[in-house]
Image (cartoon, coloured by chain):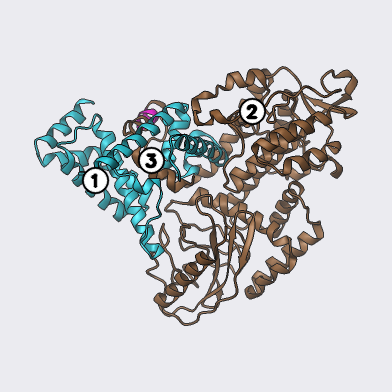
Chain colours: A cyan, B brown
Amino acid sequence: MDGQDARLLALFKQRDEQAIAETQAIYGSVCLGIAKHILRNEQDAEECVNDAMMSVWQQIPPAEPQSFRAYLMTVTRNLAASRLEQRNAQKRGGGVQPVSIESDAPDLTAPGADPAEHAEASELSALLERFLNALPQRDRIIFIERFWFYKPEAEIAANYGLSPGNVRVKLSRMKKKLAACLKKEGYHE
Amino acid sequence: MNDETVKALMKQMPAHFADEVLEYHAAHGTAGNIAAFPMVFRFLLPAAALTAAAVFALILLPHKNDEPVQVNSHVPEITELIAVESTDTTASQTTTAEASGTTGTTGTAQTVSRSSLTTTAAHSTTAKTVQTRSANTDGNSGGAQAAVPVQTTDAETEPSAYDPHDILKQFSLGDVNMDGRITTVDGQMILKDWHNVVLDGKETAFSPEQIILADVVDGFLPYDLENPWLAPYEELKTQAPADYPLSLEDAQVIVAYYTRILSNFNMNPNPTKNDYVEFLQIYQKKFEPAVPAEYTDMLMEKTVVISEDDPAQNVNIEEFGLAPIEFSSIEHFRMKEYIFTRIGRTERFNTEVHYSASRINFPDNPYEINIEILTNNEQYIGSFGPTLHYESGIEIINGKHHSNSDQVTGRLAYTGEEPGGAEDILPTQKFWILRGVQCSGDTYINPRSEITVTNTTFEEAKAILDDFFAQSELQYEP
């Protein structure tokens, strides 16, 4: 962790409210960008970032992330994704979430996670770690940008000098590999 | 596994990977932030990417494989293609390997080197320059080669288990059926998979080894860079119709053509009837059963003209039997590509329109609903579904063309980036749903009857729409 992040972390641990202001100043735009990409709505994104700041404030301490920046981004991303799911569920009318492995997977950043759920989430996390590490770096980056940062395929294609079709094929293949990994570990969609 | 599942699953991604992405971009000076990419670059960069790919191909391919690539005579291989058509991965490997064995008895063969293939594509309007020689002069083409054992796909679960270098030591790029030769069968398999994945949004049927071998088309598109707007089917016309089914070279040209057509549509918000017909012509050469040109013209004429003059009659498109599916395939292609390039963006979704029984199939959804809407007696065609990105601002291509800011003063339902906003449609606006079509994959499931709603408030219209969706879901049969 660099000095800047260490200092932010220290502020959080000291319960110094300056921590939030400084985090906003340093990482606010990055977090806002992540949230906007997922939520596609400026106001929702801003609210999401505020929620993320609050969430981090509540979780640190006791949480001690190894990388504060990555931790903050993860909190933001997951909050935005959850918010998007809720929004879509409302629009579908029923508000009923589809049952699948992901809906059971707890957000590790959520406080008070059930130990069993936490264990399963840890397993999934380890599986993802292995899966992602097995990919060539650029493919890994593409995969993460698409499914973690919610970048559109066309944007990814443009950034890497690939055709959208090519990106789509790559992603399809990687998804297939991931599905195989999950199946091998006993997960079912 | 669909995209939403993966996105949800990625909640559990260890945080350091997010860091890696930022650091990667910082190190490479690329677009590390996630701000929206300027629109213009999204149009230009694919072309640049193709340029780079072609240049790369020019540099790399001549050195990549010194052995000439054999392209067998097309006509005798029809039996192979029939075999390939039916297939899942394992079956196709076996069948095509057998089929390839039979083609070894073909009397003549054409041989083209990779360098000539690439060079031709880069500078001429001719599809290919092949050197024909008798099978007797080519020790490899005269007889059947021993089939190379097909590897199983068990190791798929370990992405790191595949080393492209090892595979390429055994097989040549493009030799997707791993029979030791690159033939029409390989080209068809590549194209079929490309179609499955890119156009239909299905999962690839290839094993990881096959994927590595298929990258010859995936990454290196022969492309006429000097004249990118040349109608590519003219290149294909250099062959007699009997030359079809297609060779690997044809496949490459067609892939390039798709890309070009897509670019054309991207840049041209108002493609003409001729644009469509051209697209149909090339499309139907590839995908049998081919609809005769006059039939295609009739379809286009009827569809386009009617949609301009009397949208309600669009439902008559069914009388063409097979044709709507063929036709919708094109729309499907356009929509799909467009949605993929636009979904999630904040720009107005202002160039894509479909005007009748188009089929929308997203890989993330088992089906989609397409609804056509008429407001205020002005044709205003929008499409939206449970998860379809929709914004107002659609311009009509083949209908009455107007901007949303003039005649259509209110937004249709589902404004904003995600469906469900729908705040600002005029409460008293007339609101007709002409028809919806429910589709799944390649199946044209359920043409729906007309629903007419007049003088509704927005809330009433939305309730009817929601009911429509709910009914559609109930009627969905995979």
Q: Which residues are magenta?
A: B22-26
Query: Any mark on residue A52, and which?
Result: 1
Circle 3 SS class: helix
Residue in the image at 50% along x and 71% along y: B468
Kindly identify which chain the residue marked by label 3 belongs to: B
Q: For the image shown, how many numbered marks are present on the structure?
A: 3
Query: Any mark on residue B476, and which?
Result: none
Mark 3–mark 1 CB contact (< 8 Å) = no
- Report the Cα–Cα distance between label 3 and label 2: 29 Å
Rendering coords of residue A84 (x, y %): 35, 53
Quick one: label 2, few (<14), some, or many (20+) residues within 10 Å? Answer: many
- Report the Cα–Cα distance between label 2 and label 1: 45 Å
Rendering coords of residue B330 (x, y %): 66, 54
Residue in the image at 42% along x and 38% along y: A145
Circle 2 SS class: helix
Rendering coords of residue B71 (x, y %): 79, 29
Q: Is residue B403 visible?
A: no
Name the mark nearer the viewer: 2 or 1.
2
Residue in the image at 45% along x and 70% along y: B466
Residue B108: which quarter of the image?
A: top right
Residue B170: which quarter of the image?
A: top right
Q: Which residue is mark 3?
A: B10
Q: Amino acid at mark 2?
A: Leu
Q: Is residue B399 above or below residue B75?
A: below
Relative placement, left or right, of B121 versus A152 is right
Q: Amino acid at mark 3?
A: Met
Q: Which residue is mark 2?
A: B213
